[in-house]
Image (tube, rainbow, N blue to C red):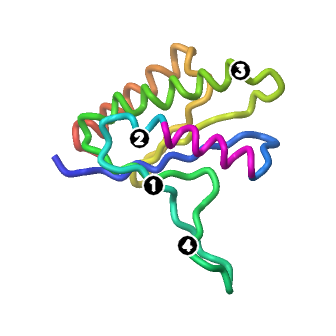
Amino acid sequence: MDEQLLRVTVAEEGATPAELDNLTTSLWRVLDQTAVNNVTRAPAEAPAGSKGPAVELGALLVNLLPQVLDSVVAAVAGWLLGYVGRSVTRSGRNVTLSIGDDSIVLTRLSAKEQHKLVDAWVKRHSDGVG
């Protein structure tokens, strides 16, 4: 099967740019330990006069084979649950996973219905349909 591009976007209500950058870096480290081919920061348009490339805050691009998507989603879910469990002041943290125009937002992963939605989303892309 052909490699897929998974876009992973971290968001949190009220997070400062530095906090969002720290969350993104933390998730990047988790994803880099999975069986993906590559994890990079999503590029952004650099402001005029800037030195070097710009990246989109909170966004990662993951190159992977469809058969590892399930384990990557599980890694994201574990990371999200770990952070939500430690956060007593904020509850608005989520991660959006996108392949092409098909996206799913992970929030409270312990909910049974969300697991069903995630499983269906993963299956669509693991089977090469998406």
Mark 1 and mark 2 in contact? Answer it, CB < 8 Å: no
Outermost residue toward the bottom? 49
Q: Looking at the rendered structure, which numbered label has been put on residue 32?
A: 2
Above/below status of 117 relative to 27: above
What x and y, as percent, mark residue 14?
82, 42
- The answer to if 114 sits in the magenta stretch is no
Q: Earlier in the sequence, mark 4 or mark 1?
A: 1
Q: Main secondary structure of the magenta part?
A: helix
Q: Residues within 10 Å of mark 3 (few under 14, many from 20)?
A: few
- Name the residue: 45% across, 55% down: 40
Q: Which residue is mark 3?
A: 86
Q: Which residue is mark 1?
A: 40
Q: Is residue 99 found left or right of 83 in the rendered image? A: left
Badges 4 and 2: C-beta atoms under 8 Å apart? no
Amino acid on which disc 1 is placed: Thr
Residue for badge 4: 53
Identify the element where label 4 is drawn: loop
Secondary structure type for disc 2: helix
Residue drawn at 51 percent across, 18 percent down: 113
